[in-house]
Image (cartoon, grey):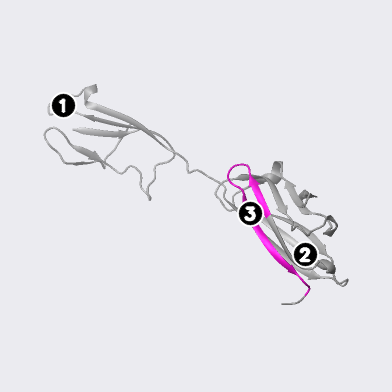
Amino acid sequence: TVVAKLNNSNRSTVSFTNETTTAVDISESLSTTTNCLPVGTYTLDLSWKDKKGATSTSCALTTTFSILAEEQNPSWDITKKGAEQCLESGDAQIIYTIKVKNIGTGTGSIDKIVDALDSKVLASYITGTISGGGLFNSGNITWELEAEEETFAADQEKTYTYTLVIPKTAFGSYTNMVTATPTTGENFSDSVEVKVDCIED
């Protein structure tokens, strides 16, 4: 007689195959896709008796295993867009929108976001307030994120905007690349090219 117990509860669906006078294979699916074992630590005990009902510690096996919670990880997506608007002065305004989203299953954090502006951009082109506390320096707009601002829950998206005014004497193609640096994992980026000409497509 072979008895299988999981955490001291008898298992009634154990199967026995390849039985011989000296050995037998014992198997059971303890956890399936439709009937999963809960997260936790388990002890599996096997014991058997001979034909006369005798048993001993030599006729027993014990093993332990754990079911771990599914690991919840952040995963990232970033998009950048630039929209041109022509001004009455003949200059052009570009409104840039950056969106960072945690498309993973767990909370994550971003240390900073750096938008490398086109080399033709001058500090005087930046008008209005850069959202989210971003600061311009040496050709870059940088968001140093701290506390709640750096935390992204699963499926959470945050938006950052700023505006450039390009003089009509500086029309042309402007390419900017934004890069986000997460607390853990690799940087991720996106870029956008805006053709500034105030000519309708």
Asked whether 133 or 23 is in front, the reply is: 133
Asked whether 121 or 160 is in front, the reply is: 121
Asked whether 17 falls inside the magenta stretch, the response is: no
Snapshot quadrant of residue 83: bottom right
Q: Looking at the picture, how far across and down is residue 153, in whole percent?
A: 62, 48
**Label 2 to label 1, Cα distance in Å?**
87 Å
Q: Residue at x 68, y 45 (%)?
A: 150
> Up-down: is 181 above or below 173?
above
Q: Residue at x 25, y 27 (%)?
A: 60
First along the sequence among labels 1 and 3: 1
The three-letter amino acid code for the residue at tag 3 is: Ser
- The residue indicated by pointer 2 is 94
Q: Looking at the picture, how far across and down is residue 52, in whole percent?
A: 12, 26
Helix, strand or loop under label 3: strand
Asked whether 183 falls inside the magenta stretch, the response is: yes
- Magenta residues? 178-198
First along the sequence among labels 2 and 3: 2
The three-letter amino acid code for the residue at tag 2 is: Ile
First along the sequence among labels 2 and 1: 1
| Residue 189 image label | 3
Q: Is residue 184 left or right of residue 198?
A: left
Q: Is residue 94 left or right of residue 41?
A: right
Badge 3 density bin: few <14, some 14–19, many ≥20, Cα 10 Å: some
Q: Residue at x 76, y 57 (%)?
A: 119
Badge 2 density bin: few <14, some 14–19, many ≥20, Cα 10 Å: many
Asked whether 115 or 45 is in front, the reply is: 115
Helix, strand or loop under label 2: strand
| Residue 53 image label | 1
Q: Looking at the picture, how far across and down is residue 172, in whole percent?
A: 76, 68
> Up-down: is 36 above or below 197?
above
The three-letter amino acid code for the residue at tag 1 is: Gly
